[in-house]
Amino acid sequence: MRKIERRAFVCLVLAGLLLLGLTFFAGEFLIKGGSWASSAFNRHLYNNDGVLTSGTVLDRDGDVLSSVDEDGNRTYYQNETVRKATLHAVGDLQGNIGTGVLNAFADKLTGYDLVNGAFSAHQGNTMYLTIDARYNYEAYQALNGHAGTVAVYNYKTGEILCMVSAPSYDPLNVPTDILDNDRYKGAYLNRFLSSTFTPGSVFKTVTAAAAIEKLKDYDTRTWTCEGSVKIGDDTIICSGTHGEETFAQALANSCNVAFAEMAVELGADTLASYTDKAGLTNSYSVSGLPTAKGTFNFDGITDDQLGWAGVGQFHDAVNPCALMVYMGAIGNGGSAAVPKLILKTRDNLGLPASLNLTHHTRRLISAKTADVLSELMANNVIATYGTDRFPNMDICAKSGTAEVGSDQRPHAWFAGFLRGDDAPYAFVALVENGGGGASVAGTVAGRVLNVIVNGY
Ligand SMILES: [Zn+2]
């Protein structure tokens, strides 16, 4: 009798272990099934070179950016410049560009599902991206061989219309010297999503937001710029000698003297909190792709360091995507849609194969301050950059010319947004070592916005 009892007990333990194992497997299967099926070891979906041989990637209006031909080889868009301009969105054949959809969204492209597994995956899914090949082409051409990034997105829907990172290369003809030639330095990185840069004067949009709320008489005061000002042990140098100026004039002149003095008056803690509030230390999820967090150093810094930090220098580093979202939030009354890259995914029956919801940021700036800052940024274009460069656009912008070392040309920035329901677009253009922000990056942004808004 005892023997039987003992055996029954052993059986019970074994049954329990089996149940535990099954539960664990089911859990792992539900969570990781997609990536198991699309693992490079699954030879049904990858060829001998490890290239994903399932799924089609299209742009927002249906141009095929990458598909698989009858021989089972992955192909790209026929135009070489478009291939380069869309490389960081689409991804490469070797898996070096981790944020490209061929690599990051392999499971969504293969059409793997829990019921059918990879059975229907030979044909794969059809993934429409939010970008337009034409806008990317224009942006890539506008960068004219410089490293940098250009992006435009709809701050109401989150759709990224244009996303370019340079240097790039032709995925069908990878340069043999890609690892040695400085021309291709960082070519595997999508600078828009994964990099941070010294912002220079585009950061004055954060210092300005703090000043509007914390310096009660900001709109009746004047500042005086004599070309430089001694703060603490250092001298803050300005780009010009601006004389006596109002707050609006100081922003339109991008006056370092006025903004460094404001930063010191505001204090490091205030500037740090407005930087956080603006989302510049956030990481966003762009259809699941994480963006790099900006980094700043406001802790225990001296007044001269704070002065430089307030004009976007010192240790300030921003991610271009986070900056663009902040621009969208100013244009949209305080918060904005989080950018997304996938418009829709269809299975081989034409049925929706993924959810692509629009998410919104928390409040990055108060509605009232956003309105005030919008007007000031509109004035920047009227007073300094020139409205004739941006026809048919109610444009608000800020330029930046970020010093990155005495032996290098500065980074050129131009960031902002358009107002109005017809064109709710925020944008960022960065030309590394490009020179003057408004002239160089402003021209790049203008060229892309013109194609999007005016069709030429
Ligand atoms: Zn000045």
Image (cartoon, rainbow, N blue to C red):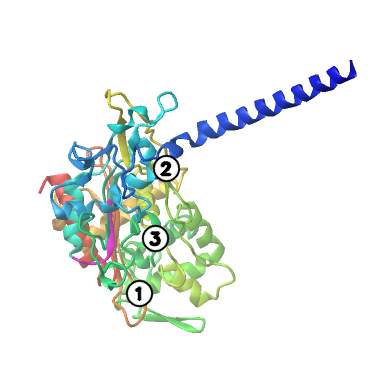
Question: Label 2 amino acid?
Answer: Ser
| Amino acid of disc 3 | Ser
The disc placed on residue 169 is none
Q: In which quarter of the image is ligand 1?
A: bottom left
Residue topped by disc 1: 403
Evaluate if marks 3 and 1 touch, with contact meaning CB atoms under 8 Å apart.
no
| Rendered residue at 39%/41% (across/down) | 287
Residue placed farthest to the right in the image?
A: 2
> Closer to the camera: disc 1 or disc 2?
2
Instruction: Name the residue nearer the viewer: 219 or 5.
Output: 5
Task: Report the quarter where the N terminus lies.
Answer: top right
Task: Tell me the residue at 26%/67% (across/down).
Answer: 437
* Image quadrant where residue 268 sits: bottom right
Q: What stretch is highlighted in magenta?
A: 145-151
Q: Is mark 3 within 8 Å of ligand 1?
A: no
Q: Is residue 384 visible?
A: no
In the rendered structure, are the residues bearing label 2 and label 3 in contact, judged by CB atoms less than 8 Å apart? Answer: no
Q: Nearer the viewer, residue 65 or 151?
A: 65
Q: Can residue 132 be seen in this view?
A: yes
Provide the residue designation for mark 2.
39
Dividing the picture into quadrants, the one containing residue 438 is: bottom left
Residue under label 3: 195
| CB under 8 Å between discs 1 and 2 | no
